[in-house]
Amino acid sequence: MKGIYKAVKIAERVYWVGAVDWNIRDFHGYRTKRGSTYNAYLIVADKITLLDTVREPFYEEMMARIASVVDPARIEVVVSHHAEMDHSGSLPRALQAVRPKEVYASVMGAKALKEIFHDAVAVKAVRDGEKMSLGDMSLTFLETRMLHWPDSMISYLEEGGVLFSQDAFGMHLASSARFADEIDPAVLDYEGGTYFANILLPYAPLVAKLLDRVKASGFTINMIAPDHGPVWRRDLERPLANYARWAAQEPGPKGVVVYGTMWHSTETMARHIGEGMADKGLEVKVMSLDTNHRSDVAYEILDAGALVVGSSTLNNQMLPAVADVMTYLKGLRPRNLVGAAFGSYGWSGEAAVHLTEIMKEMNVRVLADPLRVRQVPDERALAECVALGARIGEECLKTMEGSEGEQGG
Ligand code: FEO
């Protein structure tokens, strides 16, 4: 079994020694429909160094890949860029097996690892900007607090110009290909965007600052090696430009209508609102929560300018699937959206009112009172839905013009 797992050389004396999790489909509510990888890297410097580990069940796979290059007992230094268990889960077993001389994390990382593993892991803290000699090679560390945990950091290997970017520039994508240039670019953009929308969106302003900091660092980056998905060795402008665009959260000419429906009346309203937005020139996505997952909704709003949410009223509340997606979206803190709420109801109709309150809490610029229709919408009600969609479409386009003007100024 061990013999089948081999390391993959990604740069001179640098190897991928991670694991492929083909079948993971859920990351705390984010649906990972293409699986994932947990990337660990081995630097064969004078001081042989392991960067990160893998989720605990994949420990043997990681160790076998390491053993295909060097005897794991020769590892002198272990670095944990991020304490989350998809990267640190194998750390206690790896440390026991390898017994490295030094284990490093950021200041917050050392604290987090202590809280997670207690006395099983003893870690020294590295400072932000610290350059560490590995003998004939060197690593420089940059803290990336709240991207996306307080402990997160990245590192730069001067020899070879490799940026080990941790969760940043990664994606949940299981593949036998180790390099991004071996994968369909449309898949990379989609999975990279889905990852950003579901993991990094709340911290988008910090991503923008990080990009500036990396630019100002003077690092010559030839390769970006994240902790999930493929390694970027060519066309680095692609992930960098994508991140700059997603982090800016400029509203796009796109409206997302999300809804839950009981007997299709709210659905009919959703479709008419969508038509109204499309009439004004928006790209429209109409998403039933019977068939769309919350993480797909998060992806769609990444480049949208309008969000419209509908729900039937059930026992004086919104439908459970709608409450689920709103809790999720609120946590992701999307910015620069206009929108409104709507829904059909039988006798009390609270759902659209509650949705409006939540959207305001999310800082969505709500453009209208909740549009509520008793029972089944008639022609007049449907015309109101089209008119609401049109109004939202117009405002979305105006907001875009405003934000372009601000940028130009
Ligand atoms: Fe991939 Fe935040 O761990």
Image (cartoon, grey):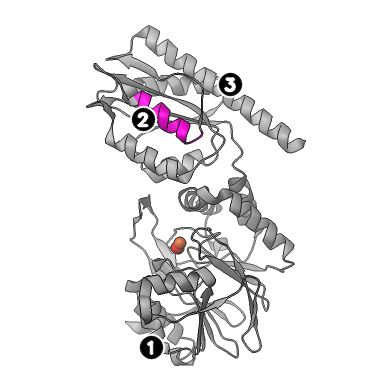
Identify the residue at image location x=48%, y=60%: 149
**Callout 3 touching callout 2 (CB < 8 Å):** no
**Callout 1 touching callout 3 (CB < 8 Å):** no
Gap in Å between the C-alphas at discs 2 and 1?
Answer: 52 Å
| Disc 3, SS | helix
Quadrant location, the N terminus? bottom left
The quadrant holding residue 220 is bottom right
Identify the residue at image location x=37%, y=80%: 119
On the image, numbered disc 3 is attached to which residue? 394
The location of residue 365, given as percent across then percent down, is 53, 28
Marks 2 and 1, the one that precedes in the sequence: 1
Marks 1 and 3, the one that precedes in the sequence: 1
The location of residue 274, given as percent across then percent down, is 45, 24
Residue 259: mark: 2
142 above or below 374?
below
Residue 337: mark: none
On the image, numbered disc 1 is attached to which residue? 97
Marks 3 and 2, the one that precedes in the sequence: 2
